[in-house]
Amino acid sequence: MKFVFNRLNSLLLIVALVLTIAGYIIMGTGDKTISPILLIIAYAVIFPMAIMAGSRKKS
């Protein structure tokens, strides 16, 4: 069985996880401006990029 994700997918997934954790930690400190921005970037941009990166089928 072949692993579907490559190195780029794994790297983007790690970046998205770090941004998500940082966003929640910052939200816990009381800052209500930067944490939603980090979370939206992580959830709406980087997580989908991590899933779709390198998904072009080779013919």
Image (spheres, rainbow, N blue to C red):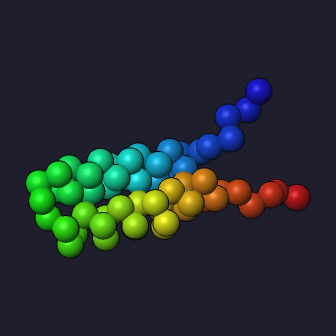
Could you say where residue 42 lies in the image, as x and y percent from the top left?
A: 41, 60
With 9 as the anchor, is 22 left or right in this view? left
Residue placed furthest toward the right: 59
Q: Residue at point 32% right, 55% down?
A: 19
Q: Nearer the viewer, residue 8 or 43?
A: 43
Q: Quadrant of the N terminus?
A: top right
Could you say where residue 22 lies in the image, as x and y percent from the top left?
A: 25, 52
With 50 as the anchor, is 41 left or right in this view? left
Could you say where residue 43 lies in the image, as x and y percent from the top left?
A: 46, 60
Q: Nearer the viewer, residue 51 or 58?
A: 51
With 56 as the anchor, is 27 left or right in this view? left
Residue placed furthest toward the left: 29
Q: Nearer the viewer, residue 51 or 32?
A: 32
Q: Quadrant of residue 3?
A: top right
Q: Residue at point 26% right, 52% down?
A: 24
Q: Quadrant of the C terminus?
A: bottom right
Q: Residue at point 59% right, 45% down?
A: 6
Could you say where residue 32 lies in the image, as x and y percent from the top left?
A: 19, 68
The number of discs equals 0
Q: Residue at point 29% right, 48% down?
A: 21
With 39 as the anchor, is 44 left or right in this view? right
